[in-house]
Image: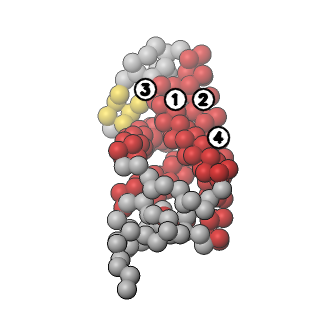
Amino acid sequence: MQVDSGSPAPNVPERYGRVAIALHWLIAALISAQIAFGWFLGEVPRGTPMRGIYVNLHKSTGLTIALLIIFRLGWRLTHPPPPLPSFMPAWERVASRVNHLALYVCMLVMPASGYIASNFSKFGIKLFNVVLLPPWGVDDKRIYAVFNTTHIVTSYLLVGLIALHVFAAVRHAFRRDGVFARMWPSRLSR
């Protein structure tokens, strides 16, 4: 007679915990919407009354998402993810680690560069169009351009990394190897 030790079977990958899963999907949805909103801003003509409202909403949402990302990073550092399954080839393990690291770097660089750029413009940030956070830097178009360009380039890089991440997740889902299920919300997650 076999006794259930409570640990998963050898071929079934461990799942992420509920907090990690919730943060993953919440931040994924927010970042996707924020990037789309940021690209939409490129279509809003400068000097129009709605531009300032939209830009400040984008900045405010970005700062809020940045706080969630910092919390998620802290959670990840204090709650290590389950190990990758032993059946995964070495190249997939390396690709997974590199992609996750690059995603975290982009998720930190993008809001930081946007925030810094805002502080080297005369506008600063009007938090949710209510509370003015005056710029702490000087109005310098060159510094602004460097950080704003970093912000925009990082958004494209992040989209590419997200696409690669989604492709890998879908691949695992079709293979039914349990890797996708580790991050999929379920009543069975911890």
Q: Secondary structure at mark 4?
A: helix
Amino acid carrying mark 1 in the image? Ser
Q: Quadrant of the C terminus?
A: bottom left
| x and y, in percent, of residue 146 in the image | 60, 22
The disc, 4 or 1, on the residue closer to the chain's N-terminal end is 1
Residue carrying label 3 = 124
Q: Quadrant of the N terminus?
A: bottom left
The disc, 1 or 3, on the residue closer to the chain's N-terminal end is 1
Labelled pair 1, 2 in contact (Cβ < 8 Å): yes
| x and y, in percent, of residue 117 in the image | 51, 25
Q: Secondary structure at mark 3?
A: loop
Residue carrying label 2 = 150
Q: Nearer the viewer, residue 134 or 163?
A: 163
The disc, 3 or 2, on the residue closer to the chain's N-terminal end is 3
Closer mark to the observer between disc 4 and disc 3: 4
Residue carrying label 4 = 157
Q: Residue at x 56, y 17 (%)?
A: 143
Q: Residues within 10 Å of mark 3 (few under 14, many from 20)?
A: many
Amino acid carrying mark 2 in the image? Thr
For the residues marked 4 and 1, what is the alpha-carbon distance in whole angstroms? 14 Å
Amino acid carrying mark 3 in the image? Gly
For residue 113, which numbered disc appears in the image?
Answer: 1
The number of discs equals 4
Q: For this view, does 20 lie left or right of residue 166?
A: left
The disc, 1 or 2, on the residue closer to the chain's N-terminal end is 1
Closer mark to the observer between disc 3 and disc 2: 2
Quarter of image, res 132: top left
